[in-house]
Amino acid sequence: MTSPSLGVGLIGYAFMGAAHSQAWRTAPHFFDLPLHPRLSVLAGRDPARVADAAQRLGWEATETDWRAVIARDDVDLVDVCTPGDTHAEIAIAALEAGKHVLCEKPLANTVAEAEAMAEAAARAARNGVRSMVGFTYRRVPAIGLARQLVAEGRLGTIRHVRAQYLQDWIADPAAPMSWRLDKQKAGSGALGDIGAHIVDLTQHITGQALTGVSAMLETFVKERPLPASAGSLSGVGGEGTGTVTVDDAAVFLGRFAGGAVATFEATRFALGRKNAIRIEINGSSGSLAFDFEDMNVLHFFDGDEPAETAGFRRIVVTEPGHPYVGNWWPAGHGLGYEHGFTHQVVDLVTAIAKGEDPTPSFADGLQVQRVLDAVERSAANNSSFTEI
Ligand code: SOE
């Protein structure tokens, strides 16, 4: 028996659009989904480029205006993969039109926008319309296992949280301007783009919220060459240089609701680190450590073991009993970056079919936005401790 379909309209086809496309295509082939995603329409402003992307990525039709996507009868869910400055307008319009929404992170560029989105999501949920923010790393199996270990009490009381998100793609001052370096479009720099992930992940794993931060932000390279031509959504092409209006690095201390103290570092200037999401958590009876550059592995120290034989255990998180893994390959064969997006689709579609609100919700996205905002306020105020 075939399951009923869920028509998807995807807005944006760059890096995230491509990642989401493969997830919508792949999920029903590996998971038994209660609704079958239909790749109804892909939207982008440039007709030739969006047509080319739709063919490459497997979409049935194209539109050049996101409003037309929302208006289509073959679209039940709108997937927002555009820069942050358009998230609020598109997501709210889609929810008001009765379409489910998946929105890329960070949820918005400001707390005010995120609040409006969370309110729209709460109103829509009363009519059975669902929404989710795309903190995709939650769906990495090793992260799922880390959360389980904390929830089972294997770490005891959490005392330290240490989180880094390290990239190096703009360490070269000759790397061109892009929308990610423009505050108008992106809201913030390393802070919102990658810092948002470690804020979400550490809160997700510990099950606790950050309550305050003390922060420093830095922009190392303030002028960059403009790219030769504007990409479909970048809007920053041309001759000469452009001014970087966001942070290149964000460093902050944090306090969690349960009393743990935390350090966070998000930078795109960590030469040699490509996508290193490093999280170490120390509790009263155990510790865990994760690095996305070795994403199928979780390190766990069990403080209850005899000192003589205790040590960090390297768990290869590829057993069928590990989160999501049973639907993929035999043990030891490993998953990659794209699988997190596929798992995101699985959880979203399952929640929609069950009539439940998926997580992370827009309210969760708003809470992360409040942390980012507190980081910016603290940094602007000589790193003073700022409550969230
Ligand atoms: C760019 O820094 C980026 O693509 C982020 O925007 C993504 O969220 C992260 O998954 C990888 O890096």
Image: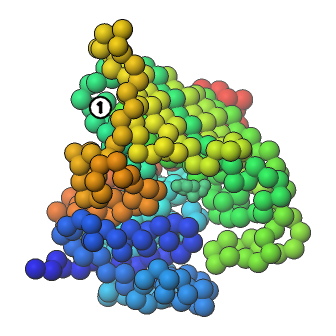
Considering every residue shown, the one lying at the far right of the view is 240
User: SS for tag 1?
Assistant: helix
For the residue pair 172 and 134, the one nearer the viewer reads as 172
From the top left corner, tell me how far across and down residue 59 is, in percent.
42, 84
From the top left corner, tell me how far across and down residue 298 is, in percent.
40, 36
From the top left corner, tell me how far across and down residue 171 is, in percent.
75, 49
| 6 relative position to 61: left or right | left
Q: Which residue is drawn at 69% across and 34% down?
A: 216
For the residue pair 347 and 141, the one nearer the viewer reads as 141
Quadrant in which the N terminus is drawn: bottom left
Q: Mark 1 = which residue?
A: 149
Q: Which residue is drawn at 32% across and 86% down?
A: 74
Q: Is residue 105 shown above or below 93?
A: above
Q: Is residue 352 shown above or below 222?
A: below
For the residue pair 277 and 64, the one nearer the viewer reads as 277
Mark 1: which amino acid?
Leu
Q: Can residue 120 be seen in this view?
A: no
